[in-house]
Amino acid sequence: MTANNNVPKVKLLIDGKFVDSKTDQWTDVINPATQEVLAKVPMATPEEMDAAVDAAKRAFKTWRRTPIGARARIFLRYQHLIREHMSELAAILTAEQGKTLPDAEGDVFRGLEVVEHAANIGSLQLGEIANNVAGGVDTYTLQQPLGVCAGITPFNFPAMIPLWMFPMAIATGNTFVLKPSEQDPMVTMRLVELAVEAGIPAGVLNVVHGGKDVVNAICDHEDIKAVSFVGSTPVGTHVYRRATQTGKRAQCMMGAKNHAIVMPDANKEQTLNAIAGSAFGAAGQRCMALSVVVLVGESAEWIPDLVERAKTLKVSAGHEKGTDVGPLISRAALNRVNNFIEQGATEGANLELDGRSPKVEGYDKGNFVGPTIFSGVKTDMSIYREEIFGPVLCIMNADSMDEAIEIINANPNGNGTAVFTRSGAAARHFQEEIDVGQVGINVPIPVPVPLFSFTGSRGSKLGDLGPYGKQVIQFYTQTKTVTARWFDEDEIGAGVNTTISLR
Ligand code: NAD
């Protein structure tokens, strides 16, 4: 970044150089706890967008042939650099995004795990071989990179989600154009600087900033072969349609409404802690946050205890010690969440805990909402139908696990879900019957580690393959199947020196 009028400008990365945009359109990156303007981010011009894609296209010519070990070693160095800079990265992230410092470290760490996985690319990008599919004929597959790929990321995990994307795309031999969230691009850019320091060559990784226009340009660009998107459902649906219309591969990980079922035999203490942490932590701005809890049978009596637990959570700036719930990302997000709370009360849900306008000493301008709990929520209420993306928990009731499963399976989203129970049989029944892509059993936020893939489903996902783990190797490569026959009659058939033919 460079200083200008005392506010730094976020740079673009094009062909290995960090450059100032020539645009006249800039937006502010704002600290959500204080409203301080931290930086200005450019809306890149069409020429800058084209320059980034051109650089990636040129770099692909050599990068695709780079030995697998050379690619892997860059990510070995990169994981080391990220570890070394963990506190610095977390501090940048907390300042621009608002989440607590431990949550910010978690955000970086979950991305770091993908980088570690990318360093293991040698054993991940293997083809298959079948010997003697016909006499003297072998068939084998090659997993070859696609070309220029692109990633579009949301504000809520500005470290983890960019790291879901470019390390695996680049490790598999592609080149990449990244479009970070314009609301908090600074930690992403620090991670990109470290990637360049780790040895990613010029043009292999490029960054353009912007909003709708840049995203549309990515979807339309004829030299981009694949697009990975993470963000809200309306935007993801638009990106998927627009990108696939021009023949690109696309994967869009989108919005959610994650339900937990609480059975009366669940461990009460553990369950209430898990629910409070996952519903209100990161101010509810997680795509895997539990935003609906279905209390089965007598567990309905736990509501007062849950309310008491939620009241103990500390609302403050993310860098303050002991903070549990930081600010929402923007004023717009704050108004949206407050409006939902108003609507929920109007529509007849019981407002058990109202987190609006909390007193936060020293941060009277912050975008704060405290933990909020509604009981008696019905499926036709807007607080149930919409993704609120704030610290607001909806509580519903059911007489049996099957009734609760029916509610969840009727919801259009399929990102994550959880069951709390001590019964193995009940948990297994849930696992088999639930139609959601990521299932937790006494685990509130079941985000898989990169040995597996992120497997949100139904309305939370468009495209078949997940953004990391095994599936992403398929996403970022084209399978080429080779059927080969080598005529050996001149050597073996003709009975010449067999030591030569066996060499
Ligand atoms: P968003 O959809 O507003 O923005 C995502 C990206 O799209 C950003 O880079 C933004 O610049 C761009 N964008 C915004 N409006 C656009 C438009 N009209 N046309 C084209 N591009 C546009 O999402 P957000 O608010 O940054 O992130 C929160 C959302 O992301 C939530 O819905 C959350 O559930 C979802 N999310 C999903 C996952 C998942 O894995 N399923 C993970 C994290 C976040």
Image (spheres, grey):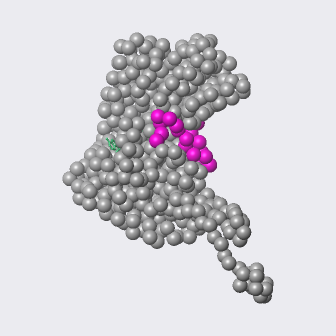
Pick the residue in front: 399 or 313. Answer: 399
Q: Is residue 85 above or below residue 16?
A: above
Residue, x 30% and y 45% (percent of image)?
A: 212
Confirm whether the magenta stretch covers residue 451. Answer: yes
Quick one: 324 or 491, which is closer to the camera? 491
Residue 210 screen position, x and y as percent: 31, 49
Instruction: Work out whether residue 287 or residue 322 is closer to the camera in this orientation and state it.
Output: 287
Horizontal arrangement in the rendering, residue 421 relative to residue 210 (left or right) = right
> Quick one: quadrant of the C terminus?
bottom right
Residue 61 percent across, percent down from the top left: 44, 70
Q: Is residue 377 above or below residue 369?
A: above
Residue drawn at x 59%, y 29% is 434
In the picture, the quarter occupied by the N terminus is: bottom left
- Whether residue 158 is in magenta: the answer is no
When the figure is inspected, residue 307 is found, relative to residue 490, above or below; the finding is: above
Q: Position of residue 64 (x, y in %)?
A: 49, 67
Highlighted magenta segment, given as a residue range = 445-462
Q: Residue at x 41, y 22 (%)?
A: 383
Question: Percent x, y for residue 155?
Answer: 40, 42
Front-lying residue, 12 or 226: 226
| 61 sits to left or right of 214 | right
Secondary structure predominantly adopted by residues drawn in magenta: loop
In the displayed structure image, the side of residue 429 where residue 94 appears, left or right: left
Residue at far left of view: 24
Q: Is residue 68 visible?
A: yes
Q: How many marks?
A: 0
Tell me the residue at 39%/69% (across/down): 58
